[in-house]
Image (tube, grey):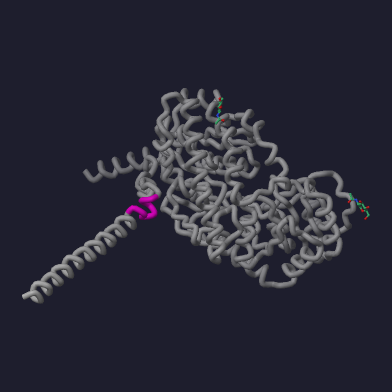
Amino acid sequence: MKFLKVVTFFVITLSLSDNIQCARILGIFYYPGKSHQMSAVTLMKILANRGHEITVVSPIGEENTPENYRQVVLKEVNEMIPDQIKNYFKLKLHPYIINYVVTTMMIPLINSTLSHPKLHDLITTEKFDLVIMEQLFSDGLAYIAHLLDVPVVYFSAFTDSLVSNPCIGNPAWPSYAPDIYSSYTSEMTFFQRLDNTVIFVINELIRNLVTLPTQNKMVQMHFPGAPHITEYYHRASIVLLNGDLSVNEPLPKVPGAIDIGGFHIRPSKPLPTDLQDILNTAAQGVIYFSMGGNIKSVDIPIEKRTMLLNVFSKLKQTVLWKWEADHLPNKSDNIVIRKWLPQNDVLAHKNVKLFITHAGLHSLLETIYHGVPCLNIPVFVDQLFNAKKTVVGGFGKTIHFDDISEENLLLAIDELLQNPNYAENAKKRSMIMRDKPMSPADTIAYWVEYAIRHKGAEHLKVASLKLYWFQYLLLDVVAFLVLCVLVLILLMKYSLKIIVGLLRENRKKSGSK
Ligand SMILES: *[C@@H]1O[C@H](CO)[C@@H](O)[C@H](O)[C@H]1NC(C)=O
Ligand SMILES: *[C@@H]1O[C@H](CO)[C@@H](O)[C@H](O)[C@H]1NC(C)=O
């Protein structure tokens, strides 16, 4: 009997783990942004390494993929990338309108993904166990999981933010949760809270009046008979967030909101020998300068570039500059240019003293991982917000791209290099990032498999998702209580009137007697 039990136990465990080990996972990553696609590939490769059968639907193909990683490339979506995004220096928007602009820029891309014959072929001829998709104002895409009747896990390229909070019910209250389009921290003054609240309300309105209705229409157009978007837009119980407590301020999260920030960082590899030599032999250390994958240094307007060149020429350090052309006119001898640099391996080198960065999230996470202080030159969207975190953490300084001058650049670089606190704080943050029960890659695998094991993990879903906004804000309860108090006051007033009236009458009667 006991033997039978043991055998049954093993059979069950084996079949369970078997099941999970070769799950068929469909990834949908519609947005062709460089860092988004890089995240997608890294994420799906992590799952492929676990033995899952991966299919990725995305606008850009990846070259080196393992055997169990199949790609369905929707080229047409990539060709639709709006011109506005091509030169980031020209895209400067106020936080009150940026979300509207970004959200509406995404709509044609989502539309084109939803209508693509390759996607339709795939989902009508094949079966999957789970859908994983980037959530970027793209609630309509969750319909694919609804149609396949499988769980969906969201990935967000940001920390907990307006992009993912409403989908999963994170309690991001504008009194202490700063919007990623702002440059605020959790501790805000009255006027910052006011501003943050206005941004919050605008974002809610855009979501409810533009994003959801438009995507509902698109889904019903491309999938006749599809139910209303409210049937499936809360389908995900788990969202993987590109955040980490080493960079983000702590905020309460629902149980299914999982930080996986730093998952893109792989163990550092040896540098190419020419670079290795440059880094080894720089007697005063190296400053690494890169504006990231989306923003190109060659697009920096000439007057700003001249300022940078002048400042760098005054430094004793070697400046390693990611410059996407063959020549950089007027560059001083201490500047070394490369069209591309293995950023993670460069930052891992002990001789790198400072990283001058656009403060994109991936760059920031890498600089924290390697404990290198940074000078942020933010340009766009969440970069200002990210940059602020390095200032709070005491390992960075920020100069907005528009405010660059030779004086403030030189001053900031000097301060960052001379004051040892910055490097110390960077090391402290690095320790926080590395102090984890599980690596980000294992965390991803664990939670994706968890969603499969528990058929979508409904039990993680918070009830606030089912409430109307006025119920969530308890406005109905407050209104009821106010009404009760009013009724009570009126009743008291009325009864008092009656009592006083009776008393008067009594007095009159006794007076007239
Ligand atoms: C989506 O694409 C279809 C064509 O496939 C077009 O008719 C429709 O207007 C588009 N919808 C939106 C909201 O762009
Ligand atoms: C290089 O420097 C010279 C002299 O300062 C200046 O006239 C020229 O415009 C500069 N060229 C570029 C491309 O910055």
Residue at 86%, 46% (x, y): give it. 327
- Please tell me whether residue 12 is drawn above or below residue 178 in the rendered image: above
Place of residue 349 in the rendered image (x, y in percent of width and height, measured from the top left)? 71, 59
Screen quadrant of the N terminus: top left
Residue situated in front as seen by the camera: 198 or 363: 198
Q: Indicate yes or no whether the magenta region holds residue 293.
A: no
- Please tell me whether residue 66 is drawn above or below residue 421 in the rendered image: above
Q: Quadrant of residue 304?
A: bottom right
User: What secondary structure is the magenta-colored segment mainly?
Assistant: helix
Residue at 52%, 36% (x, y): give it. 27
Residue at 36%, 44% (x, y): give it. 458
Q: Which residues are magenta?
A: 470-476
Relative horizontal placement of residue 351, taking residue 224 as reference (left or right): right
Relative horizontal placement of residue 243, taking residue 23 as reference (left or right): right
Name, please, the residue furthest toward the left.
Answer: 513
**Can the viewer see residue 362 in this picture?**
no
